[in-house]
Image (cartoon, rainbow, N blue to C red):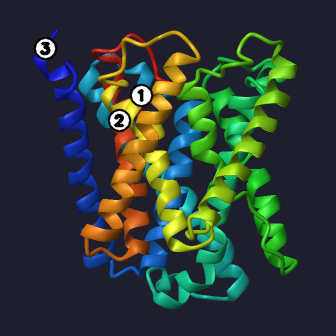
Amino acid sequence: MSLLWRQPIKGVWITLLSVLLTWITYLFMIEYAKCTLDAFMAWICIAFSVMWITGFSLQRWPASKIKNPLLSSISAIIFQSCMAVIVGFVMFGIVFNYWGLPLTVVFSYEFFRSIVSIATPWAVTAIFFWSLQYFYAGNALAKYAGIANKQPIEGIMTWLVQLGLATLVVGGGYFLGLSLYVPWIWFPIVCIQLVQFDGWPISKVSEGARTIYNLAITVFLSGVYWYLLDLCGIPFTSLPGQLHAIILTVWAVGWPWVFNNWPLRGIRTQPLKGIVQFIFVIVCTEVSYWINVHLLSVNLYLSVILWFTWIYWAIILCWHCTCFTRGYEKSPL
């Protein structure tokens, strides 16, 4: 095996490359396109949700059809970039029509102020509905419709259903004057359930019961996490709380993807594996949060966006460019 694909070397260069791509994204959005932080946040939330839903629903189609690894990776990045732009502009176009704004103000401050209240909650709610279908229900919708593993039909239909549900909830609430969405706080919790604990202790129960139990555990632990953040004086609804949640997400998801759980890969028996890795994730989260807040002179809102952008690029490199399969025996999810 090439030294490049051995841990921790692989994790280090993927981390640094993701940092570089994050910096380039920042320069483009802020320095070149002159976007506000609200605009940047709206875009990265949409881009992440589209990448997550299309990537896992379509199983890297159409890049998976290309045999050459380099061409496959390049095509995956191009496809994801195009999807993020297309979905973003379609969604923004709906708001344009509602507000009667011309398309020439696509990067204007006034435009993004009018849509950011929808874009961010819409994106995170779309990811929740996708997770409800795949993580909790075991892809039951596609199996029931008889399209499971039939790409691109499965991916497209599933993708449209999840985005449609998110649009119905968030958009419907918006037009009714209500703020309806699923807060991001559940996402790091479900990742810890599925990645660190492998679904333990209910991984062997029937699929239907497992769906209910997993969802109940997620709701309960999300409530506990919300309470603990309040107890520490950084409520989830505040910028410090949002920053803590995204850093927890980065360690819960990014560490298994980028470093393949190194240096704790040798522990495979549950619940020991979950407990040890959970402690590692929590310690790294708290250290990273403290450094970000107390040592770095970076705006907290910008910090949330940059962490979000980093995990976006890291997952694209690891999943869409198949980096995680080189030097590791299986997907961390």
Q: How many neighbours does mark 3 have within 10 angstroms: few (below 14), some (14-19), or many (20 or more)?
A: few
Q: Real-space Cα distance between discs 2 and 3?
A: 24 Å
Residue 263 percent coordinates (x, y): 29, 23
Labels 3, 1: front one: 3
Which amino acid does the dot numbered 2 rest on?
Ser
Say if mark 1 contacts mark 2, CB within 8 Å: yes
Classify residue 65 by image quadrant.
top left
Which amino acid does the dot numbered 1 rest on?
Ala
Indicate the quadrant containing the N terminus: top left, top right, bottom left or bottom right: top left
Classify residue 265 by image quadrant.
top left
Q: Residue at x 54, y 58 (%)?
A: 46
Of pointers 1 and 2, the one earlier in the residue sequence: 1
Labels 2, 3: front one: 3
Q: Which residue is drawn at 61% across and 23% down?
A: 151
Res. 75 mark: 2
Q: Is residue 59 visible to the viewer in this orientation of the structure? A: no
Which amino acid does the dot numbered 3 rest on?
Ser
Q: Is residue 77 visible to the viewer in this orientation of the structure? A: yes
Query: Outermost residue toward the front?
Result: 231
**Secondary structure at numbered mark 3:** loop
Name the residue carrying label 1: 63
